[in-house]
Image (cartoon, rainbow, N blue to C red):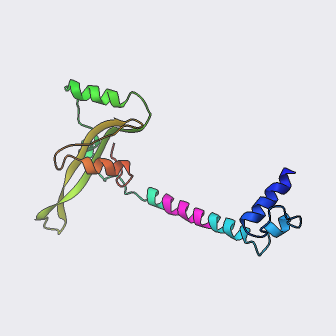
Amino acid sequence: CAHGLFQRAIGAVIDISIETDDPDLTWGKVWSWESRVWYCILMMFVVGTLEWVWLYKLCAARPEQTKLSDEEADAKEPVDISDSPELMAEKEKSHIDNDGIKARELVKVFRVAKKGAASPTGEKKTFLKRAVKGVNYGVKRNEIFALLGPNGSGKTVSMNMLAAEYTPEH
């Protein structure tokens, strides 16, 4: 019967019995202390659980959004591109389908300390740096994608937002 054949095959794989047609092979021998099948399954469960916990902590540990005052809140909004037909066409093209990777109006703002500037109370003076100002792009399945631009244009920050290293503001 198929049940006995499967049992004998398992027994041969874990080397309880060299013969696949051993009539003395039982499930008790397959799951016995000597075969250690339970140990392998337990180890796979424990290691798999630890890996999932590590991945969850890695993905959930990204920093909070930049804290902005009410007068600085407009820095969170993407740049208006309605006057550029080429940029609007690319934005609409990236919104057509949901297949693949989509970046829609990504904005990232950093609070940067001014060098050498401090207030009389000892606090450092800061200013806002908009690293990404409303990026839109879409990468379809099996498509090769290159993100090109000059130094300081936000390429690395955009990729870090997609990789959950940074939290986007918008």
Q: Which residues are magenta?
A: 46-56
Measured as percent of width and height from the top left, residue 96 is found at 39, 27
Front one among 149 and 109:
149
The C terminus, quarter of image: top left
Position of residue 163 measured from the top left corner of the image (x, y, whole percent): 38, 51
Q: How many marks?
A: 0
Left or right side of 108 for 18: right
Left or right, 64 with respect to 75, comes to right
Residue 52 part of the magenta-drawn span? yes
- Judged by its main secondary structure, the magenta piece is helix
| Residue that lies at the very extreme toward the bottom in this rendered image | 34
Q: Is residue 134 above or below residue 93?
A: below
Q: Quadrant of residue 64?
A: bottom left
Q: Position of residue 102 (x, y in %)?
A: 38, 38
Q: From this viewpoint, is residue 82 visible?
A: no
Judge from the rendering whether residue 124 lies leftward or rightward of residue 166; answer left or right: left
Residue located at (28% from left, 50% from top): 157
**Residue 3 screen position, x and y as percent:** 84, 53
Q: Is residue 121 visible in the rendered structure shown here?
A: yes
Query: Which residue is at the front of the view, 100 or 37?
Result: 37
At horizontal 72% and vertical 67% (from top left) the residue drawn is: 14
Q: Is 102 in the magenta?
A: no
Q: Is residue 28 above or below residue 136?
A: below
The residue drawn where x is 36% and y is 51% is 167
Instruction: Identify the residue shown where x is 33% and y is 52%.
Output: 160
